[in-house]
Image (cartoon, rainbow, N blue to C red):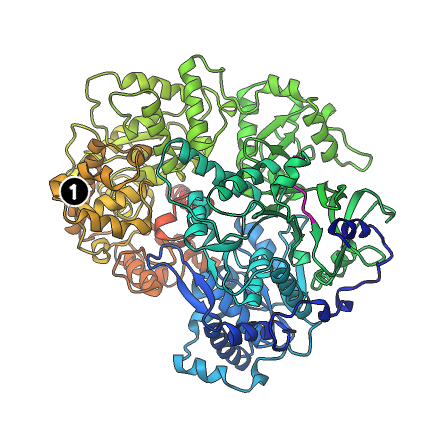
Amino acid sequence: MTQSTTAVETLDTSNHNITPTALPLEVLPKTQKTHRPTTLLSLLRQAVDTQPRHGLLIRKPHVESGFEQLTYERLWDLATANAHTLLHRGVVTPGKPVVLFFEGYWQSVEWYWSVVAAGGIPTVLPPLKGGEKSRNKELDHISRLFDHPYLITTTSSSSPFDNHGGFQVFCTDQINTPSHSVHQYAKKDSRFYDRGNGQENTTCTILFTSGSTGPSKAVKFTHRQLVTSSLLKCSTNRMGANDMFLCWVTFDHSVALCELHLQAMATGSNMVMIPPAEFSQDPLEFWRVLSDSKIAYTFAPNSFLAGATRAYNDARNQQTELPAYNFNSLRVLFCGGEANKTGTLKAAADLLSTHGAPDNAVTAVYGLSETCSALFYNRNGPSYDVKCKYAFASVGVPLPTNVLRIVDSGLRPVRTGAVQLQGSMIFNGYYNDAKATKSCFTSDGWFDTGDLGSLDEQGNLVIIGRSKEVLVLNGQKISSGELEYSIEASDIPGLEAGFTASFSIWSDRTDSEEVVILFNPAGDQIGDTPWLRAIIGQINKAVIEFCKKRPCLVLALPKSELPKSSIGKLSRSKLKAALLAGEFDGFKLSLAANQYGDNFMSSRQKAISHIFEDRLQIPASELSADLPIASLGIDSLGYLRLKSGIEKAFSLAKPLSVPQMLACQTIRDIDSAIDDTSREELVPYAPVKVLRSTGSKTPLIFCPPANGGFLNYMALWPRIPDRKILALYSRGLEWGQQPFRTLEDMLDTYVAGIKDEQPTGPYALIGSCFGGIMAFELAKRLEALGEEVVFCAGMDSVPGFISIVHKATDERHILALILESTGAINRSDIPGFLEKLAPVPVDKIIESVPTFLAPGALEDAGLYQVKLGNWIDVSMSMHLIASDYNASGATSVYDAFYTANPPRDTVVPDAASWRYIYMGEWKNHVVGASNYDVSLDYADMPSNRRADRPLRLHRISGVHEDMTTLVNIESLSRTVNEALLLREEEWSRNKDLYS
């Protein structure tokens, strides 16, 4: 029977009595001459017996030494030893779920298998998202679902669960098992850990859905389903022990576990594991890893693949030297999780085939968590969909022992209808949720995916839409209802409740789905006014906070265009159809939704808008002359790319200074700044830069870190609302200026500048690293002048600053750190760069830099030789000042924000020392502080002991090097805003009390 006939015959519903457990394992391919695995643990045992030296190659963030190997043999030993401990301590009860929460791959994999080995059901919790309220709501749900379960995590990640109280928390780093005991436990009688064998149809793993239609549901998998899935995938994909897999998805996702890890284990293959942020921050790194690691099998969603292909083409068009890629080993790069645009897949396939990959390596797939990830594979490659003129790729036919039917609402076979499935890889139900399970299975036992599809003439499935109102953004499912609720719960003045609708539309520009928000302003006031623009801005912010994506359109409509059904519901599908049909175009024109002023007044302003598009992928069509640049979510590297693009495009004789660039709040301002660069006179040094000139609350002053600038804060300050924002700027960064040589000179200059801009208090200051020390010293001086300081804070700042820094900092190291911070080189490039630079005389290092970098790298990073020299001089000066610094005296208040682990390249030995010794030293420099202030984070203190604490410690997300970047900025800004508002409230209350 041909492939196409098989697919068409799946329209027959007579097989509706097939169940997952009724399909015999005998239909599966034998992978070894030994017994076929029947449980997860026997799958691992098979890998140990056949390929003990193969396993996982794990790269951790910010680690220079490359990969750390966890072989299958080592994994077996660790898992079985840990299983003994878990059973002995009562953490695991065989057959019961145990929740796992880890931020890294090694611990996720180790403890997943440890729970499996102990006979428990590992329940892998995704990263916690949203604000504290939404996180607690999700944790409430999980605690109830599993009845106050054990949760295994690390001490550094345990705070949300300790505070919540709904979990029995077990921290793995509190276990002290001698290394020789691992081997001892691994050889113990199998009764300690091999409780799954012979129970193929029992639940062995639980993964969570994305929560797109309400609270996350817990998907149950049996041993039989996961083993069957793994063996079917490795057989039909023809993978072998010498093929290399690549995983860059968090381990809680079904792609990571079902599609990659277990399939690699079934073949005895090695698998490279890369943290997701490494590719999202640098898409070209994806192609390099595929080539260098000889990857045969991996995953990429459509939106990422589009961006990575665009980055490659942009680099080639700009004549950037690219590595000699070799993709000869690549067999399958599967794309799923969202709609796959044929043009995107074809462009990626062309790139890959140019460097040796087969034409059909790019494989469109279809599946869900409930189907053990991918169930359908398009083996023909994008060329088939191009030939058929499909806008979106077809996804092929299901894997053997699984069947498809397409039916209407009466369960009658149709050519286009609901996609429903049965077979060996389909889950049995959701844990402790009979209602949700019943709702997704039909009366005759088929799983209803909630998607709509059809079969083409060759029997390939084509997904044409979703029956459920769910947005799929960057591969993540987002509930329209929850997004709308989040917007309306933001208490936006002028937003009419109950008339907000959200849906997604396809964007050819981004090759992905984008969010559209329709809303009704109070009184149907849809005219283009500042009042309406303010509402649109706040809706933008609410959407970004909820789903980390800026909507492509926020459109105000009168109520007459937002009709409700008889039961009071808006029809998103009808509104979407009306928008796409152009029925709302008149409102877009009258509103000019994302426009903050007049249209462009000059051709140069239009040219500037295209630089935004080229350098930052922000469409020129969405920009206007007076759109606030701060609303675009640009980080420090983005500003540098923008600055470099402007200087190149207009051939500026004198580069824009960083203060000039950052003083530009609109494109109109940039236009004026270009004219200013033609003037010959020097701009006098000004120690204070105004980033925002208005606000009703206490102004916030950002203090410079050791590099002297304030680019570190470019993602943070726009998220500090309703305040004037000031930034201190070191002398010497611009041409003709001399750096500060003493701390006294620097502090005197800064205090004078602050008083000029804000003559009286109360004052609020914050800085990162050495900037937190500057905030402390300035607060002391201001208080000595009789002023009040309501807020003084540091991020990863400690009083003994210089005691944690290695002394061997010279011009070469400073240069390398500057190049890394601006994106000119990667962290992994630093050792080689320093080695090349070692023989170069100090007075020649700057002019030699371009010879060691890719062509144009300095300019793309916004650096020139003169600018680079200034930056090195300022950084060296700051380090010399810091080397003589010893904290003394005290301020009235201090808030210390810290990351869980110490910064790299310091002498701090571990996380505990960083938190309790180095951060704890602040108690000696805050009036009235005590040991209690540093014994607990402020959030962990009992509510009756929080009031008026002079010293407060707050743990923040990320690591030192990325705490203020876009990856962690939402969490950081939320924590800083809460701390700042609380200090102001207490100051105001105390002022009223004593006045």
Position of 896 with respect to 506 (left or right) is left
Location of mark 1 (residue): 877
The answer to which quarter of the image holds residue 489 is top right
Q: Where is residue 942 in the image (x, y as percent from the top left)?
A: 47, 60
Within-10-Å neighbours for mark 1: few <14, some 14–19, many 20+ = many
Q: Is residue 393 magenta?
A: yes
Q: How many labels were placed on the picture?
A: 1
Element type at mark 1: helix
Task: Point out residue 195 in the picture as x, y percentages from the top left corner.
Answer: 62, 79
Within the image, what quadrant is residue 969 found in?
A: top left
Magenta part of the chain: 390-396
Res 899 quadrant in image: bottom left
Q: Which of the two residues, 780 or 158, is positioned nearer the viewer here?
A: 158
Q: In this view, does 912 lie above or below 972?
A: below
Along the viewing direction, whichever of 587 and 371 lies nearer the viewer: 371
Q: Toward the viewer: 795 or 359?
A: 359
Instruction: Determine the residue positioned at 61% across, 38% down.
Output: 341
Can residue 739 be seen? Answer: yes
